[in-house]
Amino acid sequence: MAHGTSGKAGLARIAHMDRIRIVGGNELNGIIPISGAKNAALPLMIASLLTSDTLTLENVPHLADVELLMRILGNHGVDVAVNGRRERQEDGYSRTIHFTCRTIVDTTAPYELVAKMRASFWVIGPLLAREGQARVSLPGGCAIGTRPVDLFIEGLEALGATMEIDGGYINATAPKGGLIGARYVFPKVSVGATHVLMMAATLARGTTVIGNAAREPEVVDLANCLIAMGAKISGAGTSTITIEGVTSLSGARHRVLPDRIETGTYAMAVAMTGGDVTLENTDMALLDTALESLRRAGADVSPTNNGIRIMRNGGGIKPVDVVTDPFPGFPTDLQAQFMALMTRSSGISHITETIFENRFMHVQELARLGAKISLSGQTARIEGVEKLKGAPVMATDLRASVSLVIAGLAAEGETLVSRIYHLDRGFERLEDKLTRCGAIVERISD
């Protein structure tokens, strides 16, 4: 039986037995509304720990990771109120959620929660800033490399915190009187560590300067929200962010920015299948580099009043080489999707992954569909093939899972993607959005 995932019951049922069935060969034509960004929503939600007032977030996506973080924040004392299960708004489906943390009731983030989602580790910054202490489990999350927490530890130590690892937990303590502003230069760019240090510094005494900061739009979105809450932040979006500490933050109302990874994913799906799709409620400036790579591959990309139009009619897919890099470079979170597109190109392309190790686990699954891909270190060589053929495949992580969907949309016959609980973590109403544009996609529960 096929069914959707609307409502909380759908997300509670992230059954490992669920699969997605795709019958390939159809062009995509129509309109796809882009949801709020998961990678922006998560740190924005965590920022609610910094104030005793209410933080209201609009355009929050309905995803498994968001639901899990709501539970984790509740564990710390955040009251979460959702305006309707799904508010039907002009911009498609989105939710407004109110987060109120009058008192932090627990400064411990236990292993059983943090292990389920890496981003929940980020509570360490606000807890330390507001309460002067935090005990947070070392994180789990996606199996795409070690992603060490040393940058978080060093950054918070620069603000005067004492950080000790004990029994799989980090015990963090601020000096008496609170964290102290300082200058810290990240040895490598880290979005998560930039989020954490920026949040912690908002309540520190004095001025903090973060060097080699992440420049991603999600960092800018968090900074804008914190500024609305009363923080004094300048330089977000550049490699140097300056934060002048304040004694307290207030509530605010903030709209989560569009999901650039979802935007790029659907753009690549259209380039793969052919057709003409308008992606609504998004912005080309969020992913210039990826869209330019799509243009080079043969897709027409143009701005609309509130989004992007993607077309590919007639012409084939041209091979394009890409290297993943921090923003404004090509996003690592679109690497697997672009690789799926390149499997049908008219020549040989190369994709080099510079951000995470172990992020080529989708290669062997794409090969099951007939792709010709060879690996040498952190570079994949993709030899385009005339056609892909449907087969049973297995998702290995969030972005890899949607690359298999993209490949399945262009493959002959039926593709069955299993372990799709990964998809539910990051793509809202995927089957619904694709089906409305002519794809044959359905969720199957055995």
Image: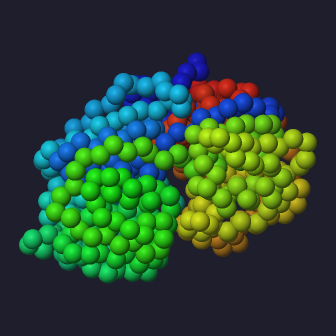
> Which residue does the image show at 78% across and 37% down from the upper left?
276
Q: Nearer the viewer, residue 311 or 150?
A: 311
Image point 58% across, 55% down: which residue?
A: 286
Left or right of 53, for residue 422 = right
Whole-percent x, y for residue 110 in the image:
24, 52
Query: What residue appears at the point 72 percent right and 51 percent down from the top-left corner?
Result: 340
Considering depth in this image, is 68 or 285 the residue closer to the camera?
285
- Look at the picture and state if 124 lies above or below 391: below
Question: Furthest-front residue in view?
Answer: 305
Rendered-image quadrant of the C terminus: top right
* Relative horizontal placement of residue 48, taking residue 262 as reference (left or right): left
Tell me if residue 94 comes above or below residue 284 in the rendering. Answer: above
The quarter of the image holding the N terminus is top right
Q: Nearer the viewer, residue 407 or 282?
A: 282
Tell me: 23 left or right of 111. Answer: right
Q: Percent position (x, y) of residue 62?
A: 45, 35
Answer whether residue 148 is visible to the viewer in this image.
no
Quadrant assignment, res 410: top right
Residue 274 drawn above or below residue 317: above
Give how far across and how far down residue 123 sits, in percent.
Answer: 28, 56
Is residue 334 in view?
yes
User: Where does residue 87 sit, x and y in percent of width and height?
Assistant: 43, 25
* Total count of labels: 0
